[in-house]
Amino acid sequence: MKKSAGIIFRTMVLLLLGIIIGVYISDNNLNNAGLGFSLGDNNKVSKALTLIKNSYVDSVNADSLEGIAVNNLLQNLDPHSVYLQPQRAQSINENLDGGFNGVGLEYQLLRDTLFITQVYAGGSAAAAGLIPGDKIISVNKKRFSGTHLTTKRVDKTLRGDAFTGISLGISAPGSEAIKTYRIKRGHVDLSSLDAAYMLGPATGYIKISKFASTTDADFRAALAKLKKQGLKKLVLDIRDNGGGYLNTATALADEFLKKDQLIVYTKGVHDERKDYFATDSGEFKEGKLAVLIDEYSASASEILAGALQDLDRAVIVGRRSFGKGLVQQQFPFGDGSAINLTVARYYTPSGRSIQKSYKGGIQSYHNEIADRMKKGELFSAQSNFDDSIFKRPSQYHTTKGRKVFSGGGIMPDIFVPADMAHNTPLIEELGEQQIFMAYVIDRQQPTLNKFASADDFIKQYGVNDGDVDKFILYASKTIKEMDSQELLISKPGIKTFLKAFAARFKWGDNVYFEVINSDDATVKKAIEAVK
């Protein structure tokens, strides 16, 4: 229902998703009988747990204890083999399978009241006529607002089995009157495309947030729409994309590659080599292509970027990717929990593995991106080559003979340093606290109603220093201490995000990214690269 911490402030969330989601073999419903044994066999681990449950001096939470034991076992293997509690497993699978059952809206909790911030097209909330800015005051004729709301409680209330009904008491923006809506829950589609629009007369932009079961179909639909608007060249943005299904990554690569070109291959001790080849069914095999990556582009994103780089099909723009070259398969338990177990490594067409080392342990592995920042890699292309991985001679080359590296992610063809004015600790905290959207709800709605269209808003709406001062005064009610120097550095980013979140509230994600990308150095470099 609700995006976890704002659409752009995903640093830790995306890192965790990259670790947990990784790249999946899509058949996650493996029958345990096919393993040759039962997951309930009485081995040492199960014996120890039985002893603890039956003989330990104090009572224990058996489910929690089992989860801890299994996860500790897995974490001694690699950073991506993990145990998932039932709710987490369900959430990941819903995210990758393209939807859930509910009413179809996003929200923000503000002053213990649920404010609608987005309504999904095709959902039951949209069909009922709900709009951003509406407040949910009551549910099933019982007071909802002001009852110590939490996101967990809200999600449990609004989600449910398809075709089940729910009664919502709604107060429209600027009104205290309550109107009752009787809504039936239904399937809510979760698109894996964040945005698709034209950057210029012939250049289109598509941003993909994950590699889900619907991604290739979503991409084809977006591409067809942009082709009607004159698309000849494409900027594909997979920054912050933590991965998803392996077969989705290969299907998307197939959109750009010629028949019989090798996309990727996988192999492991118990998994024979499997090659994935392009077919002749792709929809964009000829036009110029730029792919945007960053340090949070992981696994399935790296399969796509690695294939397009090795085969000289696209120019890769941005910063070195995460460095995850392992494939997981999900093994579900009867209670809804699951194990994500690494079953293979994947290799790009040139034969390189891009998995970074995890010999230093799990904590060191998780801190690797922070270490890149300390070394200056996020700000200087040259610092990439101070690392031993990139000093060594490489045996890997693209089809045109360009040298490429293994063992530490995908190195872009065009490096673009991180924009720290838009990614300061202050801006991250403002995003995590959801203050930008709160400000839109509380202060900007009347202003937005003055614009006839999104185009008018983009061209005419500006944020000046005085607007920033008003916003900071508003934010200071939540964030009590703000460093004056950091405020100065953050001002350009605050201006961009104030306009972008206002655009998203009124017109959705496409317009949000139009605003964000108008000031994005990586997008500008990509546009130059495909000219």
Image: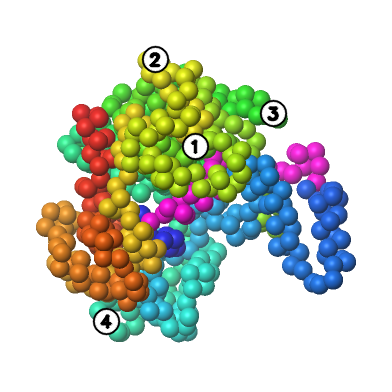
Residue shown at 36% from the left, 66% from the top: 434
Mark earlier in primary sequence (2, 3): 3
Identify residue type, mark 3: Val
Mark toward the viewer: 4 or 2 = 2
Distance of label 3 from label 4 (alpha carbons):
64 Å
Residue denoted by label 3: 269
Residue shown at 31% from the left, 68% from the top: 482
Identify residue type, mark 2: Gly
The span picked out in magenta is: 9-38
Q: Where is residue 65 shown, x and y percent of the image?
A: 73, 61
Residue denoted by label 4: 175
Q: Where is residue 211 shown, x and y percent of the image?
A: 47, 42
Residue denoted by label 1: 323
Residue 340 drawn above or below residue 381: below
Q: Quadrant of the N terminus?
A: bottom left
Mark toward the viewer: 2 or 3 = 2
Q: Nearer the viewer, residue 261 or 178?
A: 261
Could you tell me if the residues under marks 1 and 2 are in contact, i.e. CB atoms within 8 Å?
Answer: no
Q: Is residue 249 left or right of residue 218?
A: right
Q: Is residue 272 left or right of residue 259?
A: right
Residue shown at 52% from the left, 30% from the top: 407
Find out whether residue 384 is within the magenta segment.
Answer: no
Residue shown at 61% from the left, 44% from the top: 361
Q: Where is residue 45 shown, x and y percent of the image?
A: 81, 52
Residue denoted by label 2: 401
Identify residue type, mark 4: Ser
Dot 3: few (<14), some (14–19), or many (≥20) neighbours within 10 Å?
A: few
